Amino acid sequence: MDDELARRLLGVLERVEPWLPPAPVKVDWQQDVAALWQRHPLGGRLTPVPPRDALQLADLLGVERQKQALVDNTRAFLRGYPANHALLWGARGGGKSSLVRALLNDLAAEGLRLVQVDRHDLSALPVLVEQLRHEPHHFVVYCDDLSFEGQDDAYKALKSVLDGALTGPPANVLLYATSNRRHLLPESMADNQGSHLVGQELHHGDAVEEKIALSDRFGLWLSFRPFDQATYLQACEHWVNWLGQGDDWDESARREAIRYATLRGGRSGRVAWQFACQLVGQRRLGT
């Protein structure tokens, strides 16, 4: 009987084991400055990750106002002063995600720690925030490319953590998010049908109010616009020099940069970086 029971238990373990998450790697916040929050069937866990690159705030051009505002807000947070959750929204490729990465690289030595959460894992956000509440560090919980579709209820967990829960977010946690949408939710013509005039004042309908209410919970809004040509060329020169040699940026490269942006249909920091990669790579190959 004992042998039969052992055999059956072994069979159960063989079936269950593939569903179990890997053994967790404990995050050492003295050494680790960034982590991913990963969902699994039994909840979620933090996995330490090294910074993606050595990008610095000084490398980001054309976003001086946004840089200064986010640095000031984050430094106030790190020093225990009041600070706001931040929403970085606007044109794609404008430097929103790069600004958060550079912020970590520049301010990790001052105590900043970053936890990235995928949009699809936001339902577990209250669990993560509660876990960070008791850590002796200051955390920015970061969601990149945040947006929700019409029937997506995950935004309710975000609203609750931002402002709506009874306890509120802990003093050592801020939420930063990037999005191409100002209000994070899709906006349709039908939403405006509930709007009406009261005297000379426009009152939005419930659908519009619901969508505005989410982004309103971010106290710091930073908008990102497409680059003008002068800023774009300045960014191209910076990245070409960063990736290559001092003589890679010349009049020929300038003309190629303008042509590259025209073919891509826009100017941005991302387009400048992609152009620099192409130019320097081809010149190293000698083509």
Image: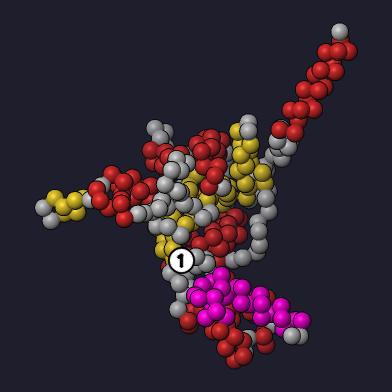
In front here: 30 or 245? 245
Amino acid type indicated by mark 1: Ala
The residue positioned 48% from the left and 82% from the top of the image is 230
Give the farthest residue toward the bottom. Answer: 251
Locate residue 50, reporting x and y percent.
68, 53
Query: Mostly what secondary structure, the magenta segment?
Result: helix
Locate residue 111, reporting x and y percent.
57, 51
User: How many marks on residues?
Assistant: 1
Q: Which residues are magenta?
A: 260-285
Residue 36 at least partly seen: yes
Q: Quadrant of residue 286?
A: bottom right
> Quadrant of the image for the N terminus?
top right
> Where 279 sits versus 153, above or below?
below
Q: Does the segment drawn in magenta span residue 41?
A: no
The residue positioned 55% from the left and 79% from the top of the image is 263
Residue 138 at least partly seen: no
> Where 211 sits versus 61, above or below?
above
The residue positioned 53% from the left and 54% from the top of the image is 144
Left or right: 207, with 12 as reference point: left
Locate residue 179, reporting x and y percent.
47, 57
Residue receiving disc 1: 91
In the structure shown, which secondary structural element does the residue marked by tag 1 occupy? loop
Give the farthest residue toward the top. Answer: 1
Q: Does the segment drawn in magenta span residue 281?
A: yes
> Quadrant of the image for the C terminus?
bottom right
The residue positioned 65% from the left and 56% from the top of the image is 51
In front here: 270 or 149? 149
